[in-house]
Amino acid sequence: MSTREEILGRVRQAIGDTPRPTAEVPRGYRGVGEGLDRSAVLARFVERVEDYRATVTRCRAAEVAEVLAAAVTGRSVVVPPGLPWPVPGSVDDTGQSAAELDAIDAVVSAAALGIAETGTVVLDHGPGQGRRALTLVPDLHVCVLGAAQVVAGVPQAVARLDPASPQTWISGPSATSDIELDRVEGVHGPRTLHVVLVDDL
Amino acid sequence: MTGTFVGMPVFPKAAREAVGDSQLRRNLAHATGTIRAKRAAVVGEVEEWEELRLAGAAIKENVLLHLDEHLVRLEESLTKAGATVHWASDAEEACRIVGDIAAAHDATEVVKVKSMATQEIGLNEALAARGIDAWETDLAELIVQLGDDLSSHILVPAIHRNRAEIREIFASAMGEVGRPAPDDLTDEPARLAEAARLHLREKFLRAKVGVSGANFAVAETGSLVVVESEGNGRMCLTLPEVLVSVVGIEKILPTWDDLDVFLQLLPRSATGERMNPYTSVWSGVTPDDGPQEVHVVLLDNGRTRALADEVGRQALRCIRCSACLNVCPVYERTGGHAYGSVYPGPIGAILNPLLKGVGHDDQTDSLPYASTLCGACFEACPVRIDIPSVLVELRSQVVDAHRGGVPKPEAVAMKAAGATLASGRRLGLAERLAGTGIRLARRVGARPWTQARDLPDPPAESFRAWWRRTGGDER
């Protein structure tokens, strides 16, 4: 008998012949936060992202290029294919190795959505967001997000995301609390996270 | 290399040694106090918290009662997404599978995401025996590994170490296994984290094989989810060519949408944050992005034994947040090592006996007694595991497993008490002797009982004697 059959057999034996009722799962939590007006959702998003000691810049669509240029000034920077904004002096993602990415200071990407309640940006690594390594290895991550992409809470985010694509949920810069439970920003992931929130996008 | 929990003493003995270590008690009191306050603050801001707990418990309960169906579905979704699924009955089989995969790629090292399942099966030691180095990349796991130490907390394995001790470990041990710590290393947490970043980066960049666990495995979509803080998880899950994830069979969630409960419950219960810095989700292989060879090892290792226990089964709902450790008055004083397992604290006190079975070794059998039954763990548990009830059930199982043979002093005492209380004559006699008995017990008899408890002063006169003396009989 294969291990698979053995384990499945043990599971069935453990559950036994007892009836297997399916418990009702309360889902009232899904409605929470839906009544908030847009400006309150956006204000909460900004407050909570900043609470992780990330930087937030709010701007208009026409100003994005300028904001990005200032954010990466003096640094080497890589951009994923499909990024809708120009970044001066940037190199394209040409499949650089991890070691090559390690020599680049910054990355600029778009995002799939933002979550106000938790101050999270989610990448689904679609156009403008690049492969996962791209937004991981460089030490500064500048992430551009339209106001319309910000949802109130985690349930709204999960409902919108497609599990077929890989995802990275980012809440602030890399951090650790492993030393005496004191939070320290900056371990292996980007030590600086800069979120650009575009109000008319 | 990380030590293993082998030949550990029974809990009362280990606990006595631990509470005598004043440095350890200071470190623990500081750490658990900090995290309790953080958790309380972020849980307090979620109005629907109790409903989320009910939802979490119900989802997990449904998974357990239909586990066979969900496992088959998960296997199907994973395979469709390009992953190779393996099944492991026990620790040895799981370690062999991971070792074989690494060997097939001629790997002499793997980088690891913090994972309870791989610690439980002793993967690092098994790989070392085959000449493969397993590098722990979580900061706390790195501290434990470099210090040749044992983990003492599920979430913060080095919670028993303070910053000065960590500086010492980094300064003396990093150079032996890679890039040494900077000469001017101080005990500032930021400098220590920087040293870990520099030390591990070369390992991330060159590793061919990554090893992880998973916090959740979605049966419907084949998605695996890893939550973490430092980015070491993202490094291990993204940069290597080959990824092996060892996943306990109870980690399943039925549908993608069920994540909306657990991604709220877990971070707030664990690190006391609204959301952990990084959550990675992947389903099998993504062309041109991340590992192009993905393996998932579905691990039993005693889980089906726990599933068969109708009272204890609920322990398999556990999402390894460690909220129960941080609120436990016993854990706060003894620390994690006293539990002799990678799963310490209240959840460890039930999970270890459930996974291993009782009546085989005294260390495991001592764990259900490592509790005051105060119930703080149940209140903190995000999936409402009624730990006190399971503890009581396991205590009765331990007693049953030891029936026959020479009875324990407690059993003799209880039997004698039963006989005494059943007869007025015998009770009267016992009351007259009680004063002498207590005085005697103080000197000799019940040392193991009295060294942790106060014996009451014997009354000058028994109730019956008083009743007779004051003429109660004549009224």
Image (spheres, rainbow, N blue to C red):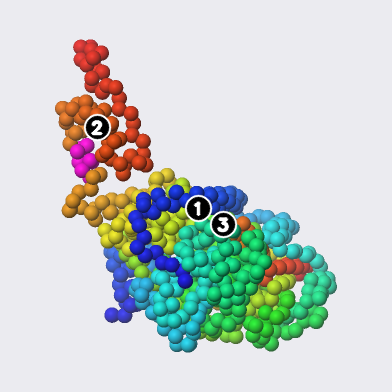
Characterize the local packing of mark 2: few (<14), some (14-19) or many (20 or more) Cα atoms within 10 angstroms: some
**Residue position for label 3:** B162
Range drawn in magenta: B411-418
Please, is residue A192 above or below residue B267 in the view? below
Question: What residue is rendered at 78% in x and 74% in y?
Answer: A72
| Amino acid tagged 2 | Gly
Tag 2 residue: B437
- In the rendered image, residue B262 lying in the magenta stretch gets the answer no
Chain under callout 1: B
Which secondary structure, mark 1?
helix
- Based on the picture, tell me whether residue B417 belongs to the magenta stretch: yes
Q: Is residue A109 left or right of residue A11?
A: right
Please report, as a chain letter, where disc 2 is located. B
The answer to whether the residues at label 3 and label 1 have Cβ atoms under 8 Å apart is: no
Q: Position of residue A69 (x, y in %)?
A: 82, 74
Query: In the rendered image, which quarter is residue B466 located in?
Result: top left
- The percent coordinates of residue B22 (x first, y second) are 50, 49
Q: CA distance from mark 3 to mark 1?
A: 9 Å
For badge 1, the amino acid type reads: Leu
Give the answer, above or below, for where A42 lies relative to A123.
above
Report which residue position mark 1 lands on. Answer: B24
Name the quadrant of the C terminus of chain B.
top left
Residue at mark 3 to residue at mark 2: CA–CA distance: 47 Å
